[in-house]
Amino acid sequence: MISDKSYNMKQAARQLKNIVSFVEQGHSVGLTRDGEPVAILVSVAEYQSLHSAPKQDFFQALKKFRNQYADELDDCQEVFSGIRETSPGRESSW
């Protein structure tokens, strides 16, 4: 699970005060029903940071990735240099 602690719904109802205190300290708590995860509790500050984070489309994310890893990506040219077929290919009838 992606949370720091996990409780089933009955446990969560009985320990709500402790769970809220734990979440206020910056932790996350997962809630399960019948053994399956159904919710994650996070602090207001964490929720606001997640909710207000700027949305990125694929192109923006790719651009950010390329900028972040530009040095490592430059090294990749050597790795792939001899892989691509260089012949002109076969003739096409259309």
Image (spheres, grey):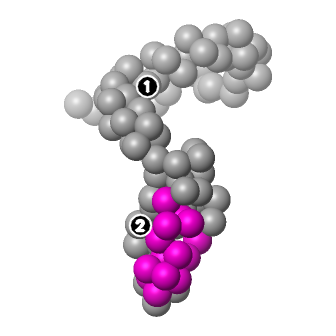
Q: Main secondary structure of the magenta part?
A: helix
Sequence-earlier tag: 2 or 1: 2
Is residue 19 inside the magenta stretch? Answer: yes
Q: Label 1 crowding class (10 Å Cα cut-off): few <14, some 14-19, many 20+? A: few
Q: Secondary structure at mark 2?
A: strand
- Frontmost of labels 2 and 1 is 2
Query: What residue is at 34 percent from the left and 25 percent from the top?
Result: 54
Please identify the residue farthest to the front as the structure is shown: 17
Measured in 3D between alpha carbons, the distance from the residue under mark 2 to the one under mark 1, in whole angstroms, is 27 Å
Left or right of 54 in this view: 18? right
Q: Is residue 62 above or below residue 16?
A: above
Q: Is residue 35 visible?
A: yes
Q: What residue would you read off at disc 1?
A: 61
Q: Is residue 71 above or below residue 16?
A: above
Q: What residue would you read off at disc 2?
A: 39
Query: What residue is at 62 percent from the left and 66 percent from the top?
Result: 5
Looking at the picture, which amino acid does disc 1 mark?
Answer: Ala
